[in-house]
């Protein structure tokens, strides 16, 4: 197999897909130990009917055109999967014809209550039965986006096809093993060799991008600011379009580590189907009465259209130097598509009020520590079961109460497009201070839309000795259940301990197990995230 010439990082996001790359030093360069500059790779995509343009963000949306004239010459971007268009034009059309578009397909990979390999997207029935397009599975939707990336890369690098490069693809830290396996299947269906691809948790990628810029001096400054001298904790809060990931990373002095500093991921939060999509849903519910009346409700397909319009308005308002208000347009139905359009205005203060009070409320340590989680109904839309507790700050607080080990100040790294809104970032910092009793160290986040892809490249370079790696191993312990005699509690045997590093040999201690033969058997596998205080199980 030809040696890779590039490390390519792919952030396959719920809202946008981003690709970054750095050229590896040539093997025949004597003593070459420096990679080329890390760059964001623009992805050519259809941005309007008949118009293609390369952009740094590839919206993770698919659209099946009604009229063949909507498509550009396939040679401009490469033939997409069975006629589906990927990118900016697909997302724009999703706001007009949601029954022919697929968005947030990544969120479906973690939806255990559906068959994620079955053609179920777009979700729901179209209002026009004759116009109902063929459907795709969540796996195929992800594969279509990755295939678009592959074709775009190959067109720009004909002498270095993507399948021959070292690829790091990011996934939510809280993705379970089924969701990770389905992501791997999407990689295979996109015709990328599995041996060339490594998976990396998104919060780790965000931290690696910060550490890449800050260097060892930045890590040493963390130790100083922590107040403990030899240990610092970094809380990474990554709020994406569909999920919220919370991870705790530890920086410690270690004479045996490069530069005398070791970095480890010590805890990962629970899977939270909670993110920017939920803000869009909350805005749509708030604006719906203004558009159709106090006691009227939109049918599912048109409500999905309103959600997409709210998403577009939100992103315009949160953009750097964005306007103070944006018009939200709900197109008419059927023949009255344009003439029946309705409009309302969403202002920045109203957007921030909805996001702050609904998703980033103030929290209190004593109240949070003393109460049991109340069962609350979360927003449910387009078939996805969102988290029952919508307050991201409460999830962050509970995570810190459970996993924090140090007593010094916690550093906080925020990632995700929602933190373009300074008010939301300030609420997140305030939540950390409410739990720790100390103002957190605010780590700079230059561009939360691009950090994960850049950090994926940094990880790929580190695997080749060209940077710093994050240790910590498996975020969960894995167990196989054993049958129990009547009246006995069921037991389980640890097969992979929490914290086991990839490639680390595991030698099981002597244990004799009985096996019933001659009939079918089922082996249940259990996972336990545990806590930072959990002693490591022996395999």
Image (cartoon, grey):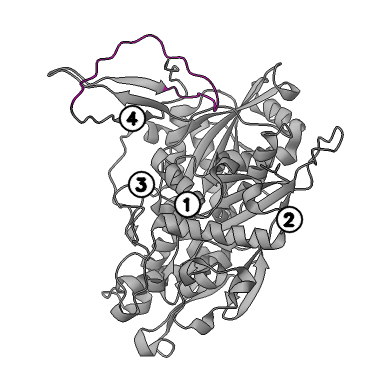
Residue 435 spot, x, y in % from top left = 48, 33
Do callouts 3 and 1 mark residues in contact (Cβ within 8 Å)? no
Do callouts 1 and 2 mark residues in contact (Cβ within 8 Å)? no
Which corner quadrant of the image does residue 324 belong to?
A: bottom right
Residue drawn at the location 44% of the way across and 88% of the way down: 338
Residue wearing tag 3 = 389
Q: Residue 186: which disc?
A: 1
Mark earlier in primary sequence (1, 2): 2
Label 3, label 2: how far apart the Cα atoms are? 50 Å
Residue 274 spot, x, y in % from top left = 42, 50
Mark earlier in primary sequence (3, 4): 3
The verdict on residue 15 being magenta is no
Could you tell me what secondary structure mostly forms the magenta stretch?
A: loop
Residue wearing tag 2 = 159
Mark earlier in primary sequence (2, 4): 2
Which of labels 1 and 2 is toward the front? 2
Which corner quadrant of the image does residue 167 belong to?
A: top right
Q: Residues within 10 Å of mark 4 (few under 14, many from 20)?
A: some
């Amino acid at each position: 197999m030809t040696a890779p010439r590039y490390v390519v990082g792919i952030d396959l996001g719920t809202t946008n897909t981003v690709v970054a790359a750095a050229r590896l030093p040539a093997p025949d360069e004597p003593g070459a130990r420096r990679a080329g500059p890390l760059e964001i790779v623009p992805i050519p995509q259809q941005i309007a009917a008949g118009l293609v343009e390369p952009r740094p963000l590839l919206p993770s949306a698919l659209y099946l055109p009604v009229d063949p004239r909507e498509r550009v010459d396939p040679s401009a971007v490469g033939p997409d999967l069975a006629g589906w268009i990927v990118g900016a034009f697909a997302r724009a059309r999703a706001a007009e014809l949601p029954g022919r578009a697929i968005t947030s397909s990544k969120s479906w990979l973690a939806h255990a209550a559906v068959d994620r390999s079955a053609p179920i997207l777009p979700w729901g029935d179209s209002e026009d039965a004759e116009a109902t397009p063929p459907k795709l599975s969540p796996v195929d939707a992800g594969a279509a986006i990755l295939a678009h990336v592959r074709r775009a890369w190959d067109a720009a690098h004909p002498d270095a096809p993507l399948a021959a490069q070292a690829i790091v693809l990011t996934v939510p830290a809280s993705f379970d093993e089924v969701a990770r396996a389905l992501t791997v299947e999407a990689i295979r269906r996109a015709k990328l060799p599995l041996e060339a691809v490594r998976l990396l948790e998104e919060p780790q990628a965000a931290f690696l991008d910060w550490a890449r810029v800050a260097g060892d001096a930045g890590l040493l400054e963390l130790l100083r600011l922590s107040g403990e001298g030899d240990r610092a904790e970094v809380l990474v809060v990554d709020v994406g379009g569909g999920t919220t990931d919370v991870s705790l990373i530890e920086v410690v002095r270690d004479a045996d580590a490069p530069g005398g500093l070791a970095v480890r991921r010590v805890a990962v939060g629970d899977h939270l189907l909670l993110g920017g999509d939920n803000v869009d849903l909350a805005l749509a519910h708030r604006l719906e009465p203004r558009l159709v009346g106090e006691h009227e409700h939109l049918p599912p397909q048109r409500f999905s259209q309103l959600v997409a319009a709210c998403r577009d308005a939100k992103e315009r308002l949160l953009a750097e130097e964005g306007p103070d208000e944006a018009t939200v347009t709900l197109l008419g139905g059927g023949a009255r598509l344009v003439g029946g359009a309705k409009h309302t205005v969403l202002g920045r203060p109203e957007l921030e009020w909805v996001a702050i009070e609904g998703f980033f409320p103030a929290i209190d340590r004593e109240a949070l520590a003393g109460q049991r989680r109340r069962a609350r109904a979360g927003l449910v839309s387009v078939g996805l079961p969102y988290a029952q507790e919508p307050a991201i700050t409460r999830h962050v607080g509970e995570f810190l109460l459970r996993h924090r080990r140090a007593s010094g100040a916690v550093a906080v790294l925020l990632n995700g497009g929602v933190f373009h809104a300074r008010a939301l970032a300030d609420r997140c910092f305030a939540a950390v201070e409410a739990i720790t009793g100390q103002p957190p160290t605010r780590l700079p986040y230059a561009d939360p839309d691009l950090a994960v892809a850049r950090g994926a490249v940094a990880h790929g370079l580190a695997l080749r000795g060209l940077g710093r790696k994050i240790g910590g191993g498996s975020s969960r312990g894995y167990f196989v259940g054993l049958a129990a005699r009547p009246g006995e509690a069921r037991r389980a045997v640890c097969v992979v301990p929490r914290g086991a590093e990839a490639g680390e040999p595991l030698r099981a201690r002597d244990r004799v197990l009985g096996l019933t033969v001659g009939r079918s058997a089922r082996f249940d596998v259990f996972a336990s995230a545990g806590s930072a205080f959990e002693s490591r199980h022996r395999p």
